[in-house]
Amino acid sequence: MPTQLEPELKSPTAKGAARRAMLVEAAATFVARNGSRGTSLAQIAKAAGVSQAGLIYHFHTKEELLHAALDLRDEAEEYLAWSEEENPGLAALDIIATAIGNWSKQPSHVGMHTVLVAENAAQRGTAMHARLTTKYQAGVSQLAAALVQAQQAGDVRQDLDPRHKAMEILAFIHGLETAWLMDPKMPVKVIAKQWLVDQKAALRPQ
Amino acid sequence: MPTQLEPELKSPTAKGAARRAMLVEAAATFVARNGSRGTSLAQIAKAAGVSQAGLIYHFHTKEELLHAALDLRDEAEEYLAWSEEENPGLAALDIIATAIGNWSKQPSHVGMHTVLVAENAAQRGTAMHARLTTKYQAGVSQLAAALVQAQQAGDVRQDLDPRHKAMEILAFIHGLETAWLMDPKMPVKVIAKQWLVDQKAALRPQ
DNA sequence: GGTTACCTACTGAACACTCAGTAGGAACGT
DNA sequence: ACGTTCCTACTGAGTGTTCAGTAGGTAACC
């Protein structure tokens, strides 16, 4: 019995892995532009250089492809990229502002996520809604924990509901993503910088 | 030639007007839940008590129906509900916080708008994208003007880009809308109240 | 008798997904 | 060195369904 903790499901051949990567990237790009329902498998397949049936060989359903694309995005996420041990406290805000500045490195991933969240926001009962909701709740908890730490360190006012503040911050991030999707020339970096200054001013004790 | 400034296109009979209102309401509800591409005309028509062809009699195309639904939402909007003359200055923030508290009165309109913005955010070149972008830009300008007024009145720090701040605020609103769509039990009122306090703290001079 | 408010029945296109088959290569025994 | 076997990575030609929109008619009401 070999090491069967993670591998196995990965990639039988390098060719297949490369093709899957192309399909996922094409999917992210089209979904960001046209939404998941506005994107056809044929469109994605053509952009990745295979037939529609070729796509289905790699990803059995459209949903499976979307999940694979989200898996990739989740791996590359930067907003809340810290482990349980290394709670950053108030520096969480700096991490977020920096992450916003890095959107332009992966515009398709950011756009896909934004559109998928909106499309599935009210789709209660579906697997996609469950996934996105869970991820969101985890983000709230993680950010709230950082704020609690900041309160304990004396960096943040005591009279402040950390969970509600975390929700406010995540709402700002998501809304800014949407605005940036509408107009990629929007100065998100500058806005994020001003936001950072204002937040720290509002949260400072006394 | 009668008064032809606004009427004419409105409603030949009361029955027709009532049906149109039902169709628009049904459209808003379904679009909020399933997105515009995930909603069929048949679905909307059935919910409004007519056949699909009956719907098409009132609204010649799907897009026309969506625009009509947005028209209604735009009329009822509360965020930036002040005319050019009565610039509210810093009180604009209070108006916004109050408007957020009123979402639950028209959940379908709020949800429809949120989903439509995300679906069409990257759809450059379409009529829907143009409409939503224009509306957004107007919102930024209006809110920025209120912030400038607040600066002149001495209520807000001088070193603050009012336009960028306006974009930040609108991003927060939109992101909160999406989060509320995902989970209607989210305490948006409380979050908005805390946001209001924090914003005023951050914007106060000195 | 004309306008308004519908209806049933249909069309053509697009869609996700299926199916049967094939080229190419690695793994094995002989 | 060779043939057999098996697997991956596809293709092209469908399937049934759903969709927005059309055609043409009907009935009520002013």
Image: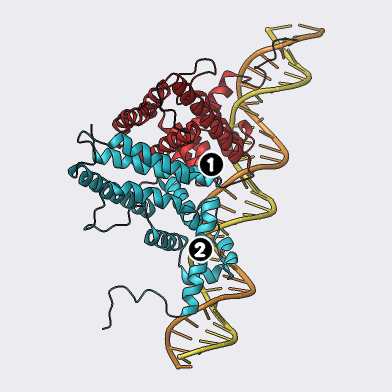
Chain colours: A red, B cyan, C orange, D yellow
Residue B192: x %, y % from top left: 42, 43
Residue A181 appears in the picture as rendered: no
Q: Which mark is residue A42?
A: 1
In this rendering, the label closer to the viewer, 1 or 2: 2
Residue named by callout 2 = B25
Give the letter of the chain under mark 1.
Answer: A
Residue A103: x %, y % from top left: 39, 29
Quadrant where the C terminus of chain B is found in the figure? top left
Residue A152: x %, y % from top left: 47, 20
Does C16 sit above or below residue A142?
below
Report the side of A154 relative to A4 (left or right): left
The part of the image, by quadrant, that contains residue B71 is bottom left
Give the letter of the chain under mark 2.
Answer: B
Q: CA distance from mark 1 to mark 2?
A: 34 Å
Q: Which mark is residue B92?
A: none
Residue that appears at 44% across and 45% down = B118
Q: Kindly give the residue lying farthest to the front in the view shown.
A: A206
Residue type, label 1: Ala
Residue A24: x %, y % from top left: 52, 31
Residue A162 appears in the picture as rendered: yes
Give the camera-side residue of B124 and A44.
B124
**Contact check, label 1 and label 2, Cβ < 8 Å:** no
Q: Residues within 10 Å of mark 1 (few under 14, many from 20)?
A: some
